[in-house]
């Protein structure tokens, strides 16, 4: 018998954006299928006055406290207040910083928001995001050679969200829709620089996503054609044949999250680069 879902409060205190905490908290919470976290995020907490307001909220809705606070005095206050309230508190970065310090032989600089410095890497990600948005859904095919990765696939195979996720990792990504009886852009077929990856999913999954996507926005005839599983199966067969003909790898996204799909693509990219180095490219 399945246990009913329970809820708990998860308080995330950060002196920066809170992205690190949010990722860590959700990764841990995902391991408990019968317990759902109610997230309370407190970014840019850098003074005692700000921290006092945070603890007013925690006092009203007590729960687990995770924090990333560089200021050690504020961090001690969090530990002491949580201990007095009988609540668990964990500094998410402190154990990692300890390992770095031990290995590198020098203490951390303890700069607030150091991962968000406006350096060359940051601007590389912005450039990748701009490129990706300009090359969404087959736009601007003439300079597709400038992409790092090109995603191709039939409608509703998560090409756009996967492209944006990769762009946030600094990877210039274009995506091109595949439609039977409509030739792909010639620039795609002649591209040498980018890694071209085909995305597919089961006909059942695509049909379901398409129904949810366009319900109430199309005519009945168009709706039937767009969501018909036999039609989708033909679209997928065309995508598979095209990828097979050109030696492009395929990834089935039926049961993959966007993050898992992106990780598989990045692994393919690393593998291709390694192979190219070995062959002298």
Image: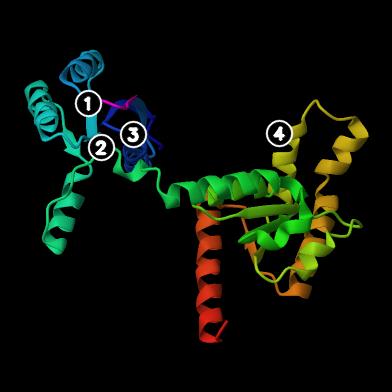
Q: Secondary structure at mark 2?
A: loop
Circles 4, 1 touching at the beta carbon (< 8 Å): no
Image quadrant where residue 69 sits:
top left
Query: Can you identify the residue that label 2 sits on?
Result: 112
Residue 172 percent across, percent down from the top left: 59, 54
Q: CA distance from mark 4 to mark 1?
A: 44 Å
Query: Can you identify the residue that label 3 sits on?
Result: 18
Query: Can you identify the residue that label 4 sits on?
Result: 212
Q: CA distance from mark 2 to mark 3?
A: 11 Å
Q: Is residue 199 visible?
A: no
| Closer to the camera in the image, 231 or 190 | 190
Q: Is 119 displayed left or right of 54 in the figure?
A: right
Task: Tell me what residue is drawn at x 37 percent, y 35 percent.
Answer: 34
Q: Is 210 displayed left or right of 107 in the figure?
A: right
Circles 2, 4 touching at the beta carbon (< 8 Å): no
Residue 213 percent across, percent down from the top left: 72, 34
Q: CA distance from mark 2 to mark 4?
A: 43 Å
Q: Secondary structure at mark 4?
A: helix
Q: N-terminal of the two: label 2 or label 3?
A: 3
Classify mark 3: residues with Cα within 10 Å, few (<14), some (14-19) or many (20+): some
Task: Tell me what residue is drawn at x 19 percent, y 43 percent.
Answer: 110
Q: N-terminal of the two: label 4 or label 1?
A: 1
Q: CA distance from mark 3 to mark 4?
A: 32 Å
Classify mark 4: residues with Cα within 10 Å, few (<14), some (14-19) or many (20+): few
Q: Nearer the viewer, mark 2 or mark 4?
A: 2
| Closer to the camera in the image, 65 or 109 | 109
Q: Which mark is residue 46?
A: 1
Task: Tell me what residue is drawn at x 87 percent, y 39 percent.
Answer: 224
Q: Nearer the viewer, mark 4 or mark 1?
A: 1
Residue numbers of the magenta segment: 41-46
Q: Secondary structure at mark 1?
A: loop
Q: N-terminal of the two: label 3 or label 4?
A: 3
């Amino acid at each position: 018998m399945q246990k009913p879902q329970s809820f708990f409060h998860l308080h995330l205190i950060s002196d920066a954006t809170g992205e690190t905490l949010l990722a860590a908290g959700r990764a841990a919470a995902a391991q408990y299928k019968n317990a759902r976290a109610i997230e309370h995020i407190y970014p840019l907490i850098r003074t005692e006055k700000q921290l006092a307001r945070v603890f007013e909220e925690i006092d009203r809705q007590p729960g687990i406290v995770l924090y990333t606070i560089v200021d050690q005095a504020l961090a001690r206050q969090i530990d002491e207040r949580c201990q007095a309230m009988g609540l668990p508190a964990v500094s998410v970065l402190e154990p990692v910083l300890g390992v770095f310090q031990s290995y590198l032989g020098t203490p951390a600089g303890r700069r607030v928001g150091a991962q968000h410095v406006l350096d060359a890497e940051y601007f590389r990600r912005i450039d990748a995001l701009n490129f990706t948005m300009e090359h969404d859904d087959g736009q601007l095919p003439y300079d597709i050679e400038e992409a790092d990765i090109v995603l191709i696939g039939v409608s509703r195979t998560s090409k756009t969200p996967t492209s944006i996720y990769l762009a946030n990792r600094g990877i210039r990504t274009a995506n091109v829709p595949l439609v039977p009886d409509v030739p792909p852009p010639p620039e795609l077929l002649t591209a040498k620089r980018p890694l071209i990856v085909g995305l597919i999913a089961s006909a059942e999954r695509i049909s379901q996503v398409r129904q949810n996507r366009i319900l109430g926005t199309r005519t009945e005839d168009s709706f039937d054609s767009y969501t018909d599983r036999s039609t989708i199966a033909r679209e997928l067969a065309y995508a598979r044949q095209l990828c097979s003909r050109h030696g492009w790898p395929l990834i089935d996204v039926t049961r993959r999250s966007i993050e898992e799909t992106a990780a598989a693509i990045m692994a393919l990219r690393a593998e291709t680069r390694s192979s190219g180095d070995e062959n002298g490219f």
